[in-house]
Every structure is written in structure tokens, then in C-alpha cells.
């Protein structure tokens, strides 16, 4: 592996780009609530109604509505621009969260809660939009810009992990230390303020795609995209099942209060690995790197299952931290492939589809992990086989995609941003860069 500069130098150079900090900081504020809303809503609903089943059903309704609306919203972002879509979308989303709070607080009929949560389907994928800005800033088809996109995607993945490490802790603290609705109120205010500040930074916003660039086959029909989405679906199942099983494991030992910090260790390991991964200049094909990272994730996901057999939460914590260290590299390389295979005029839509697959996997993993805890003879200890199985499926899908080149251009096909010609206006594509170019990433852990 070639020598690479120190991480501090690489990330400092990245953030020194004109306007980079101006959109990165508000985007971070806008993304933090994504790790808060789920925990805040569960605490709020159970405080007033006492039913975890109802709280879970309300959250599942919001998640499923986002799965349907997310790609449609992202398509409008590609066609109309980020700011024009973000502002009305976040207004509707915040209205949904506030309406749900009022309905719960005032004792409105339960059916109205589900109606309110449907409005939150317009939650904007600000993480994907931030990655699109980096792809626009470093849009030249050169190895240097390709390496910068790789570092930017790793940086964004680390921010995702930070949000989903700190968000649930902050929400739980606000709801318990102040009042049950405090988490939802704070998250809604952060989402609205951060998103509006991010949308106001028009200097780094990618231009809307020309009409003809957004026409034709969509991202779902792009060569190689379906296997990638299947891999993201299985990866999401890892996260969803691992969280539920860990909560059950801690609860069975009377240590449920420690489950949050233990799971935060997993996110911390992923964030640290993501920052290190972004500082490296890696060789080989992008699909080969994705297969290798997924295989490493499958191997490391067996560690929690082994640690759980000891019955010790203390030993489970470092196992989860190590297991998380393959997560960010896998997500970074996976999102890099998404950027390569989707049409340039559908970039936001393609990345949102990947996030949607992750969210769907998280929902399936949560259900599967809960079923395993309830029905397997070994309880939570045996249920750690669920995330291990999901990781194995992810690795198998990534390996299959590596062995089977996609599209008529073969495995070297890469994402190539369009540029407007000063003379003609329509989009034109730059020449194909050398095959040694390095590539570039998104994820919300939904409520993990």
C-alpha cells in the first residue's frame, strides 16, 4: 500500500476548500437530530401511553413512509436544486414532528399520531446532499480529485457515526432530565435551523441537472446498482439486529443502562476507522475494495457472538468496538460505487436509494433480531447469530458483484460529474481518467 500523508494534513486540506466549513457545520447540526428522533419519540410516547408496542408501530410507520418518499424527494433535488426542495421539505417534516408531540401531549386519538408521523416522510437526506457538494467541488476527472472525493466520503461517514453516537444519548438525557417532550422539541429545532443554514449556502450547491441528464433509465436500472442495494439492505440488517440483540443481552443481565454506552463504542470504532480509511490512498478496483471491506466486516461481526458466550457485558464492549471498525470502510466504498454507477444527473437520487436500502435493512434487522431473542433457545446470546448471518450475506453479495462486472464498460466504469460548457450550456462529460484513479460515498443510521 502506498505511503499516505497524515490524516490531520489530509482533512485540513479538505476543509480549507472555499465554502467547505460554511456548509459542513450547519449540515452537521441538521444531521444530529436523525439520531435523536427515534429515542425521543419512544420515550415521549411511553411516558404518556406506556406502550412500547405502540411507540414502535408509530416509528415503523414513519420509517416506511420515508423509504417510499425519500427517493422521490431526492429526484426533485437533482432536477430543481437543493435549496428549492430543502426548505419546503424540512418545513413539512418539522410540522409532522411538532404535530405528533401535540397529539401525544393533548391525548388526541391514536390514529392521529400515525397521520402526523406520515408528514415526517419528507425528512431531507442532508448527508447525501453534503456528499453531492463534495463531488461537485472535486469534480475534475483527475487522480487528485478522485482521492479527495474518497477522503470527503470517509469524513462524511465519520460525521454520520458521530451523530448516531451522540444523538441518542442527548435525546435520552433531555427527555429524562427535563421533560419527556424535550428531546423532540430540541431535535426539531436543530433540524430546522441546521437545514435552513445549509440551504442558504448556495455558493457550493451543485447546479440542477439539465433536463436530458435526468431523463432515461433511473438509478435502479443502472448496471450494478441492484446488487449494491441488496448489499446495503443486508448491511442495514446488521445494524438493526445488533442493536436490538445488545439491548436484550444487557437487559437480561440487569444492566440495560449500560447498553447505550456499549453500542456507542461500536459507532466510535466505525468513526475512527472511517477517518483513518479516508487518509489512505488505496490501490485495486473499487469493487475489489468493497468486497474486501465487506469480508472484513463479516469476520469482525463474529466477535460479539463469541464475546456474548462469556455472559459478560464488559467483554462485549470491546468486541463491538472492533466489529464497528469495518463498518465505515464498507459504507465508504459502497457509496463510492453508487457514485460511479448512477447517471450523473441522478446522483442525489442514487445515494438516497442506498440510504433507503440501509433503512429497510435496519427495520428488517430489528424485527429479525427481536424474533431471534424471543424464539431461540439461547435467548440474546444465541441471537447474535442474526447480525453475523446478515454480515455474511453482505460479504457474499459484495464478492458476487466483484466477480461479475456490470454494464458494457466493465468494472472500470466510474462516476463522472457533468460540467456545463460556457459556450453551449448543455452538459458535457470530461474524458475518462486513468484507471488508477481513486474513488469516493452516505448513511443515516436511521434510528439504528
Image (cartoon, helix red, strand yellow):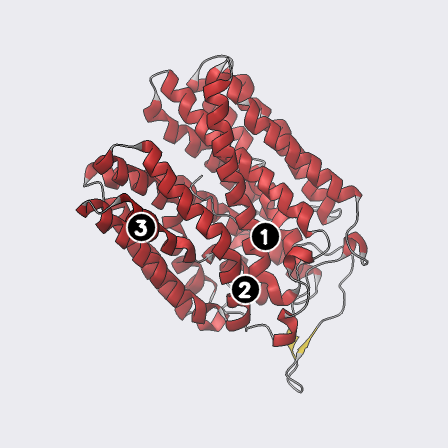
Identified at 39% across, 21% down, the residue is: 250
Do we see residue 397 in this rendering? yes
Residue 101 image point, x, y percent? 25, 49
Q: Secondary structure at mark 2?
A: helix
> CA gap, disc 3 to disc 1?
25 Å
Q: Circle 3: is it few (<14), some (14-19), or many (20+) Cα within 10 Å?
A: many
Q: Which residue is mark 3?
A: 187
Which percent across, then down, holds residue 144? 67, 60
Q: Nearer the viewer, residue 96 or 228?
A: 96
**The N terminus lies in quadrant:** top right
Q: Secondary structure at mark 3?
A: helix
**Which residue does the numbered mark 1 point to in the structure image?**
441
Judge depth for marks 3 and 2 and give the one in front: 2
Q: Which residue is mark 2?
A: 75
Locate residue 78: give its quadrant: bottom right
Q: Residue at x 66, y 63 (%)?
A: 343
The mark nearer the N terminus, 1 or 2, is 2
Please identify, in this view, whether the residue under mark 1 or under mark 2 is nearer the observer. Answer: 2
In the rendered image, residue 315, in percent from the top left (x then y), is placed at: 47, 18
Amino acid at each position: 500500500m502506498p505511503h499516505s500523508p497524515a490524516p490531520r494534513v489530509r482533512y485540513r486540506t479538505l476543509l480549507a476548500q472555499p465554502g467547505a466549513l460554511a456548509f459542513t457545520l450547519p449540515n452537521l447540526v441538521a444531521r444530529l437530530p436523525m439520531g435523536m428522533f427515534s429515542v425521543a419519540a419512544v420515550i415521549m410516547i411511553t411516558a404518556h401511553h406506556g406502550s412500547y408496542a405502540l411507540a414502535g408501530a408509530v416509528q415503523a410507520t414513519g420509517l416506511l413512509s420515508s423509504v417510499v418518499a425519500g427517493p422521490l424527494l431526492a429526484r426533485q433535488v437533482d432536477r430543481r436544486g437543493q435549496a428549492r426542495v430543502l426548505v419546503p421539505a424540512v418545513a413539512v417534516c418539522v410540522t409532522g414532528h411538532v404535530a405528533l408531540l401535540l397529539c401525544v401531549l393533548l391525548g388526541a386519538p391514536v390514529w392521529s399520531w400515525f397521520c402526523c408521523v406520515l408528514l415526517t416522510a419528507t425528512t431531507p437526506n442532508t448527508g447525501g446532499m453534503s456528499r453531492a457538494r463534495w463531488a461537485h467541488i472535486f469534480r475534475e476527472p483527475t487522480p487528485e480529485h478522485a482521492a479527495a472525493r474518497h477522503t470527503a466520503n470517509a469524513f462524511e461517514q465519520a460525521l454520520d457515526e458521530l451523530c448516531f453516537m451522540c444523538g441518542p444519548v442527548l435525546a435520552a438525557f433531555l427527555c429524562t432530565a427535563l421533560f419527556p417532550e424535550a428531546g423532540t422539541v430540541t431535535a426539531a429545532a436543530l433540524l430546522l435551523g441546521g437545514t435552513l443554514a445549509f440551504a442558504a449556502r448556495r455558493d457550493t450547491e451543485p447546479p440542477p441537472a439539465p433536463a436530458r441528464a435526468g431523463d432515461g433509465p433511473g438509478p435502479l436500472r443502472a448496471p450494478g446498482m441492484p446488487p449494491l442495494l441488496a448489499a446495503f439492505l443486508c448491511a442495514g440488517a446488521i445494524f438493526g439486529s445488533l442493536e436490538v440483540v445488545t439491548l436484550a443481552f444487557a437487559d437480561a443481565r440487569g444492566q440495560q443502562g449500560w447498553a447505550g454506552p456499549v453500542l456507542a463504542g461500536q459507532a466510535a470504532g466505525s468513526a475512527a476507522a472511517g477517518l483513518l480509511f479516508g487518509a489512505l490512498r488505496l490501490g485495486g478496483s473499487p469493487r475489489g475494495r468493497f468486497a474486501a471491506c465487506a469480508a472484513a466486516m463479516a469476520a469482525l461481526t463474529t466477535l460479539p457472538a463469541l464475546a456474548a458466550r462469556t455472559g459478560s457485558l464488559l467483554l462485549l464492549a470491546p468486541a463491538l468496538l472492533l466489529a464497528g471498525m469495518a463498518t465505515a470502510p464498507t459504507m465508504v466504498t459502497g457509496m463510492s460505487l453508487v457514485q460511479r454507477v448512477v447517471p450523473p444527473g441522478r446522483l442525489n437520487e442514487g445515494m438516497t436509494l442506498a440510504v433507503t436500502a440501509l433503512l429497510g435493512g435496519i427495520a428488517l434487522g430489528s424485527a429479525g433480531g427481536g424474533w431471534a431473542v424471543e424464539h431461540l433457545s439461547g435467548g440474546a446470546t444465541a441471537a447474535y447469530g442474526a447480525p453475523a448471518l446478515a454480515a455474511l450475506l453482505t460479504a457474499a453479495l459484495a464478492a458476487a458483484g466483484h466477480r461479475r462486472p456490470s454494464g458494457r464498460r466493465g468494472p472500470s466504469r466510474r462516476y463522472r460529474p457533468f460540467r456545463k460548457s460556457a459556450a453551449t450550456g448543455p452538459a458535457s462529460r470530461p474524458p475518462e481518467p486513468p484507471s488508477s484513479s481513486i474513488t469516493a460515498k452516505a448513511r443515516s443510521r436511521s434510528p439504528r
